Image (cartoon, rainbow, N blue to C red):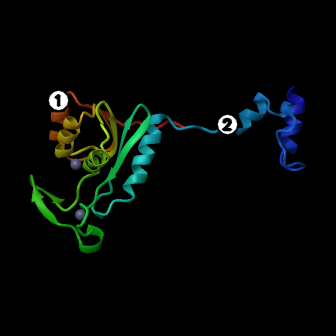
Amino acid sequence: MPRSSCRASATRGTDSMEPFENPETDTLEAHAALKKVRPSWDEYFMRIAHEVATRSTCPRLAVGAVIVRDKRILTTGYNGSPSGLPHCDDVGCLIRIVDGRESCQRTLHAEQNAIIQAAYHGVSVTGASIYCTHQPCLMCVKMIMNSGIEEVHYAGGYPDPLAMELASEGGLSMVKFAPDEN
Ligand SMILES: [Zn+2]
Ligand SMILES: [Zn+2]
């Protein structure tokens, strides 16, 4: 009954600590007012990848990766130094020119750390997807291919067109992330 449900929801929480005492107050109309906008699965996992990236220890770029299968997270990774080595944030980056580009050689990439975490815990990533805040580089694409991961969702770009070429040649699905519209 809409009229009674309106009255009930208007007074909910003000006169009683037992808002569900009267089952008639739990109407569709009252539920509609409480309903949240839920993110899509892609949006959800990519948001988590961006959160993971905040743990990065290299000031040059903060990258996050999340490996997912059957809508469940298997592992996560961010770019940072191997265990036992100092953080770039503390001692500066270890810069070398590789393939004509300056890059920090101290850190493992987010995708690599997510795959390594799977090995560390003995978790198979065969048939999984990986959500990355940036397009994976060539080395990461090759590691993703051999780990058994079948699909990459990436948000930001990365200047490594050869990585895209090899992914395409090897049948690795590379999906550019499209944020939810709401
Ligand atoms: Zn660095
Ligand atoms: Zn990489």
The residue to which callout 1 is attached is 170
Sequence-wise, which precedes: disc 1 or disc 2?
2
Please tell me which residue lies in front, 99 or 54.
54
Please tell me which residue lies in front, 165 or 16.
16
At which x and y percent is residue 37?
A: 60, 38
The answer to which quarter of the image holds residue 107 is bottom left
Residue 35, numbered label: 2
Q: Residue at x 88, y 48 (%)?
A: 16
Amino acid type, mark 2: Lys
Report the number of numbered marks.
2
Q: CA distance from mark 1 to mark 2?
A: 43 Å
- Quarter of the figure with the N terminus: top right
Please tell me which residue lies in front, 2 or 120.
120
The answer to which quarter of the image holds residue 101 is bottom left
At which x and y percent is residue 155?
A: 35, 43
Please tell me which residue lies in front, 60 or 106.
106
Q: Crowdedness of circle 2 by 10 Å Cα count: few (<14), some, many (20+)?
A: few
Amino acid type, mark 1: Gly
Q: Residue at x 29, y 51 (%)?
A: 110
Residue 117 relative to residue 161: left or right: right
Q: Residue at x 44, y 47 (%)?
A: 48
Depicted 68 relative to depicted 87: above or below = above
Residue 106 relative to residue 10: left or right: left
- Quarter of the figure with the C terminus: top right
Ligand 2 under 8 Å from disc 1 Cβ: no
Q: Are marks 1 and 2 in contact (CB under 8 Å)?
A: no
At which x and y percent is residue 163?
A: 18, 40
Depicted 66 relative to depicted 53: above or below = above
* Element class at badge 1: helix
Would residue 84 be visible to someone looking at this image? yes
* Element class at badge 2: loop
The answer to which quarter of the image holds residue 42 is top left
